[in-house]
Amino acid sequence: MTPARKLRALVVDDERLARQRLEDLLARTDGWELAGIADDGDSAVRAIQDLKPDLVFLDVQMPGKTGIEVVRKVGVGQMPATIFVTAYDQYALKAFDVAALDYLVKPFDDERFTEALRRAERTLELRQAGRLTAQLQALLSGSGAANPPSYLERIAVEMRGQVRVVPAADIDYISASGPYAELHVGDKTFVIRERMQTLEERLDPAVFMRIHRSAIVRLDRIDALLREAGGDYGVKLKNGTRLSVSRTRVEPLEEWMGLARQSSKNA
């Protein structure tokens, strides 16, 4: 990757040797430079707000504030791309709950660092592409007014050392698997390291609906709404797949299918 400007990374860790290792790895990586360092949670919050880095390597356990508390203090929406660094793997799932892009478990090798950094680069490229698309839409409309958000049209998937692009239009449904999401396309399944909440926000809500905390479905793939014994609900897709529907999602789904409106007319 050879960007017009170098990407800037902030290193946050209370251990000097851990900071030094990340600094050395960044120094050997083309296209990146060190934006600054912080050695506790409070200074991390100030550095993020003042330096506005593209990426933060954020230690989980630190004096003052934990890495997760730093994210909550800055605000998930205001955080740069974030890679958590931890010596404790059990923190991994909690890290993803607060929108971590990736996490490194100490001690990590050079290859794992490079993998995390490449993931950050792809994420930053997508964010930049989204901003440029919005600017182009404003230009073409002849107005600087706010435009509808741009939604994902394709998702990059890494498999066996290769990157494959999966069009959103080909996805039947998405299911959660821990910190991963599984894209189901026909008889194929592609695994990506992404949170369901992020995917829900980035996919067109007129096309995709989150019907369960662990399932997002393409609406035109739904064949039938199922009323199960005990008051539970589900959907059957056109390919025969059955998925559970959360009780809170039944009404929006019925409205999309026209069932709620029909019920109100009959009342």
Image: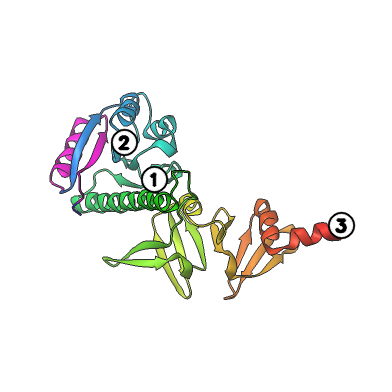
Amino acid under disc 1 = Ala
* Magenta extent: 3-29
- Side of 229 relative to 90 (left or right): right
**Could you say whether the residue bearing mark 2 is in a helix, strand or loop?**
strand
| Closer to us: 30 or 264 | 264
Is residue 243 part of the magenta span, yes or no?
A: no
Residue under numbered circle 3: 267
Tell me the quadrant of the picture where the N terminus can be found: bottom left
Q: To which residue does mark 2 refer?
A: 59
Residue that extends furthest to the front in the rendered view of this protein: 142
Q: Which amino acid does label 3 sit on?
A: Ala
Q: Whole-Å distance between the Cαs marked 3 and 2?
A: 57 Å
Q: In this view, does 51 lie to the left or right of 238?
A: left
Q: Rounded to the nearest whole Å, what is the CA distance between mark 1 and mark 3? A: 50 Å
- Compare marks 1 and 3 and give the one earlier in the sequence: 1
User: What type is the residue that disc 2 sits on?
Assistant: Asp
Residue at 51 percent across and 53 percent down: it is 200
Reading the image, the residue beneath label 1 is: 92
Where is the C terminus found, in terms of image quarters?
bottom right
Q: Nearer the viewer, residue 25 or 222?
A: 222
Cα separation between marks 2 and 1: 12 Å
> Residue at horizontal 36%, vertical 23%?
64
The image position of residue 8, as x and y in percent, is: 23, 40
> Observer-nearest residue: 183 or 176?
183
Local secondary structure at mark 3: loop
Q: Residue 64, which numbered label?
A: none
Task: Judge whether residue 7 is colored magenta.
Answer: yes
